Structure formats: C-alpha cells, structure tokens
Image (tube, rainbow, N blue to C red):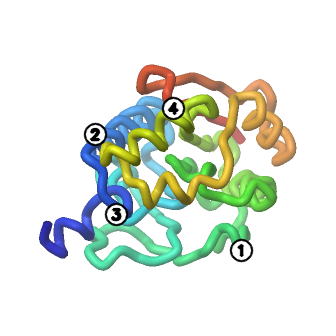
Amino acid sequence: MSESAAATRPTRGAGLLEGFLARQRARQANRLIPSRLRGGRILDVGCGSFPYFLSHTSFREKLAIERRRPPDAPEGIEWHELDLNRDAELPFEDGHVDVVTMLAVIEHLDPSALEGLLAEVHRVLAPGGRLIITTPAAWSDPLLRWMAGVGLVSAEEIDEHAFAYTHSLIGWYFGRAAFRRDGVRFGYFEMRLNLWATADR
C-alpha cells in the first residue's frame, strides 16, 4: 500500500473491513443529523487517522479534533490537536457548534476523562444542538478481538479499547453532563454489534 493510501485509511492499522465499517458509521451518523442543523458548524471529536466522516457529510463549517493532524488532511476542515485523555477542555467558546460527533471514540478514552469531556461538549453545543455517539456494544468485545486476530479489523485500534459501554451507562454520563433527559435517544446498527446514542442540548 502506498504512503498516500495509508494516510487516508479511516483507522490506524490494517483490517479488511475497516473501510466498510467507516462507511457504516458515517451513514448512521448522517441519518441522525437533523437537516435544520446542517447550515451550521459540526465538530468531529476524535476523527481518526483520516476524517472519513467529515469528508462525507454536508455542513457550512467543519471542525476536527485529533491527537495529530493527518498528513493528507482534506481542505475545508479546521483542525485542533488535543489529547482527550489528558485535556478535556475544548478550544471553543460556549455554544460555538451545532453538532458534535464522537464516532468509535469513547471506547478509547479513560472512563474518568469521559464525564468532563461530555460536560465540555454540552458547553460548546448551541441550544438545540445535538451530540451523536457510536461505540461497539459491550457484548461484542470478544467478537471484535477475534476479528482483529484474523485481520478483519485493526488489531491496533482494538487493543486500545479502554472500556465497553451500554445504553444505560451512556445515558448516565449524559445526565451527569446536564443533557436534557427528554432529548436522549438510543439504538443499534451493524446487526447490533454497535450502538448509537444522541443527546440534544
């Protein structure tokens, strides 16, 4: 694989299904974004080794947070480098963005950092804005590790999973971050291997 092709992969490491899975996450996230918000700003937190989702969604302004900016980052995205396990303070003013996405991110974070990060997400979301999270279902971890072992998904990414989440646990974190209880929704995708959750500001 060429250096350029490697730089545009949606995840670090190799896995035959990584491109397919990135497309599924992007499709699910796009379904959860109300059309009324697309004229504003979207922030993708933990966009990965290449911003696949941001490259496949339509917004007036696109912002990204990742530990390091990818070498072949596409134009039209405002980049911010931040290690979320060390510093959960987001570099934006209150109410700056309309949508925040965290796709296949929270499983990589220290759970002790997640509460503060979600409080920051709540702060930077505009009233009426939406947070969208996807993460592997808690029960799927053994299957994901088997898939990594046979080269279907990135072993490097799976080895970095720090915690597994359920809908009820994510809902608890939403409550701690002051999201409205009546603005929270949950569901599954990819044959229930992954879950999604949304919380409105």
- In the image, 47 versus 138, the foreground residue is 138
Determine whether label 4 and label 3 are within 8 Å by CB: no
User: What amino acid is at disc 4?
Assistant: Asn
Describe the element under mark 4 as helix, strand or loop.
Answer: strand
User: What amino acid is at disc 3?
Assistant: Phe
Determine whether label 4 and label 1 are within 8 Å by CB: no
How dense is the environment of label 4, judged by Cα within 10 Å: few (below 14), some, or many (20 and up)?
some
Is the residue 80 above or below the residue 62 in the image? below
Q: Which residue is mark 1?
A: 87
Cα separation, mark 4 vs mark 1, equals: 27 Å
User: What amino acid is at disc 1?
Assistant: Asp
Q: Which residue is mark 2?
A: 20
User: What amino acid is at disc 2?
Assistant: Phe
Q: Which residue is mark 3?
A: 50
First in residue order: circle 2 vs circle 3: 2
User: How far across and down, in percent of the image, does residue 79 sit?
Assistant: 45, 74
First in residue order: circle 1 vs circle 3: 3
Q: Which residue is mark 4?
A: 194
Describe the element under mark 3 as helix, strand or loop.
Answer: loop
Q: Residue at x 33, y 54 (%)?
A: 52
First in residue order: circle 2 vs circle 1: 2
Cα separation, mark 4 vs mark 2, equals: 14 Å
